Image (spheres, grey):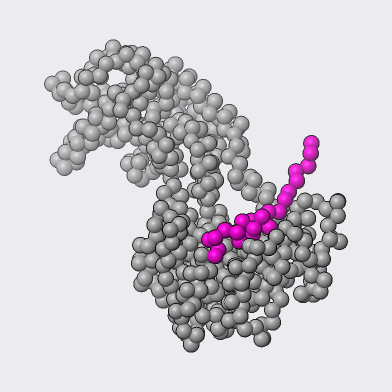
């Protein structure tokens, strides 16, 4: 078996970025704001912002004058930060980032104060977002920090299926948060992919919070020799310091600002893959592709000059970078592979299909057999259910987290299997729910992944005006289309109990009658479209139990489309044969 080869795509990604006009448009927007801003305004004074409407993009730009940025952002040695627990009540905009596994994070206080200073205009800025066009959010230095926080503020209501991904491009922005914030964002590749941070080897600002703060997103590190992209946080931290060629004590922030403009204007004219540094001795015919790619990437950002910029061991950096990129490639491959565990899933579904057939042969239906727990095989079903549910919960979680192109592909490939899973397994979850004495499953007990699977089907399924012949022919073997059908049946049984009870109030009885009439219409419409399995008519099913109780309550004089149909036992067989005619 051949050994898997790994490659580094940092140069190719960088080439794509710098050749794309998005970078040029973002920097142009920042320079326009620069012209409007007085040099007397320090970064602690204010942040300027403006919306630029271009034919193909909407750009929201933030600008702070770079002078004194280092002193301002460092505040108390870089330890001046605000915690999510402190902001929970006073500024709840980022509460959604806190999870049970990762409950706390910190944000650099100066950056947060600048962002909070424009809190009042956030609704205005958000109103300018047009989902028909890509959204670019950009900023320089501390303006980049504000751009980052503004982008994060959009994620709470971000919906993959209806919203285009925003792209946040920062130039010379300092790190803004601790490892808690990094984890909150990096755990969601959809969010993490929204950030591109451009950093010059001459700029000290992105390096001032290197201790205690952690990067997220993609970093485009650049030098006079070229540029390359890096995504691993530990590698980024290491390279931010190793590739720094400036002198903090005499660095002119205005010249650094101008250098980004020069970079954007000229770098896309360079041939990025050409060897422009003295690194030939590090690459020979035995060098592995991953290591060779990393050497070329490091050369592009100025790390392999004949005179080292720092007292560093370049071989250690190459080895560390290679190890981390290989680990990331393996992790991404596992995360993106929707076929993981597919054989086991097929086995579990096959077992449940067999269980369903046995239940039908016994005249009970698999929903009621499972709910009643007749023998050991019903207990075994729990294990198969758990395996399937873990698989599909993970699949939906990955589909929600991944960028649109990957998520859409994953969802499309998974839709058929996910629909069958939902229609097979959710009834069993419903059985457990009502067996425990609970009520209102749809609003109180339904799992999020079932809701998303159902929504994905509705987004792709063409509306039907009535039953087709194929559905009629196969109604005896289909899974009921509405996976919450048995929840409706259980609620109807509860309504019957309320009507029969002498302790129920008139208001409760009126509500129960209304719900039962709605249930009648729901069942009749489902049958008319041949969307419900004929197994509901099995003698020991909960549906037939409901019908027995409802017939006693309404009496023989009551007439409706559904009750008239159910009073004739021959209609059950006709429905199963696909020959039942509906009025």
Q: Residue 363: x and y, percent?
A: 40, 18
Q: Is residue 317 magenta?
A: no
Q: Nearer the viewer, residue 328 or 375?
A: 328
Which residue is farthest bottom?
A: 40
Q: In the image, which residues are magenta?
A: 1-24
Left or right of residue 124, residue 22 in this image: right
Q: Is residue 59 visible?
A: yes
Rendered position, 109 above or below 416: below
Q: Residue 283: x and y, percent?
A: 83, 57
Q: Residue 94: x and y, percent?
A: 45, 64
Q: Kindly indicate the quadrant of the structure image that contains residue 543.
A: top left
Q: Kindly indicate the quadrant of the structure image that contains residue 223.
A: bottom right
Rendered position, 28 above or below 135: below
Q: Is residue 23 magenta?
A: yes
Which residue is farthest top?
A: 570
Q: Residue at x 52, y 53 (%)?
A: 190
Left or right of residue 553, residue 14 in this image: right
Left or right of residue 84, residue 253 in this image: right
Rendered position, 489 above or below 318: above
Q: Residue 568: x and y, percent?
A: 24, 14
């Amino acid at each position: 078996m051949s050994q898997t080869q790994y490659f580094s795509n940092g140069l190719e990604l960088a080439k794509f970025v710098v050749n794309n006009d998005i970078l040029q448009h973002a920097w142009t927007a920042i320079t326009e704001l620069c012209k409007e801003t007085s040099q007397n305004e320090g970064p602690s004074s204010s942040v300027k912002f403006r919306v630029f409407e271009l034919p193909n993009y909407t750009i929201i730009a933030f600008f702070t004058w770079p002078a004194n940025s280092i002193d301002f952002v460092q505040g108390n040695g870089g330890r001046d930060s605000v915690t999510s627990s402190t902001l929970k009540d006073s500024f709840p905009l980022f509460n959604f980032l806190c999870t049970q596994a990762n409950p706390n994070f910190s944000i650099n206080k100066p950056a947060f104060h600048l962002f909070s200073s424009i809190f009042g205009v956030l609704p205005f800025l958000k109103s300018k977002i047009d989902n028909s066009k890509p959204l670019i959010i950009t900023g320089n230095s501390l303006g980049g920090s504000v751009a980052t926080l503004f982008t994060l503020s959009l994620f709470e209501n971000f919906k993959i299926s209806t919203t285009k991904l925003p792209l946040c491009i920062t130039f010379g922005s300092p790190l803004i948060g601790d490892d808690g914030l990094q984890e909150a964002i990096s755990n969601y590749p959809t969010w993490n992919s929204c950030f591109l941070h451009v950093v010059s080897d001459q700029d000290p600002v992105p390096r001032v919070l290197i201790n205690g703060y952690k990067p997220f997103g993609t970093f485009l590190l650049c030098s006079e020799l070229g540029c390359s992209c890096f995504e691993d946080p530990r590698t980024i931290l290491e390279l931010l310091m190793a590739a720094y060629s400036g002198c903090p004590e005499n660095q002119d922030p205005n010249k650094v600002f101008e250098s980004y403009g020069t970079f954007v204007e000229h770098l896309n004219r360079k041939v990025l893959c050409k060897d422009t540094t003295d690194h030939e001795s590090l690459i020979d015919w035995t060098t592995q592709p991953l290591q060779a790619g990393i050497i070329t990437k490091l050369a592009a950002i100025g790390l392999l000059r004949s005179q080292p910029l720092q007292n560093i061991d370049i071989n250690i950096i190459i080895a560390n970078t290679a190890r981390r990129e290989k680990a990331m490639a393996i992790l991404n491959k596992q995360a993106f592979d929707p076929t993981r565990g597919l054989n086991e899933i097929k086995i579990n579904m096959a077992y449940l299909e067999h269980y369903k057939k046995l239940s039908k042969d016994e005249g009970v239906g698999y929903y009621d057999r499972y709910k009643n727990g007749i023998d050991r095989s019903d207990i075994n079903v729990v294990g198969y259910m758990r395996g399937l549910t873990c698989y599909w919960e993970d699949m939906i979680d990955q589909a929600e987290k991944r960028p649109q192109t990957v998520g859409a592909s994953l969802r499309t490939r998974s839709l058929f299997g996910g629909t069958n899973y939902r229609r097979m397994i959710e009834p069993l979850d419903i059985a457990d729910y009502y067996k425990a004495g609970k009520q209102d499953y749809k609003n109180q007990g339904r799992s999020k992944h079932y809701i998303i699977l159902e929504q994905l089907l509705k987004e792709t399924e063409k509306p039907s005006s009535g039953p087709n012949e194929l559905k009629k022919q196969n109604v005896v073997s289909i899974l009921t289309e509405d996976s919450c059908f048995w929840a409706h049946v259980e609620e109807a049984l509860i309504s019957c109990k309320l009507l029969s009870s002498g302790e129920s109030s008139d208001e409760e009885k009126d509500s129960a009658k209304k719900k039962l009439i709605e249930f009648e219409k729901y069942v009749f419409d489902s049958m008319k479209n041949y969307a419900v399995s004929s197994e509901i008519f099995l003698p020991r099913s909960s549906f037939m139990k409901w019908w027995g109780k409802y017939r006693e309550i309404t009496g023989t004089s009551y007439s409706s489309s559904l009750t008239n149909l159910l009073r004739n036992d021959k209609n059950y067989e006709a429905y199963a044969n696909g020959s039942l005619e509906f009025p």
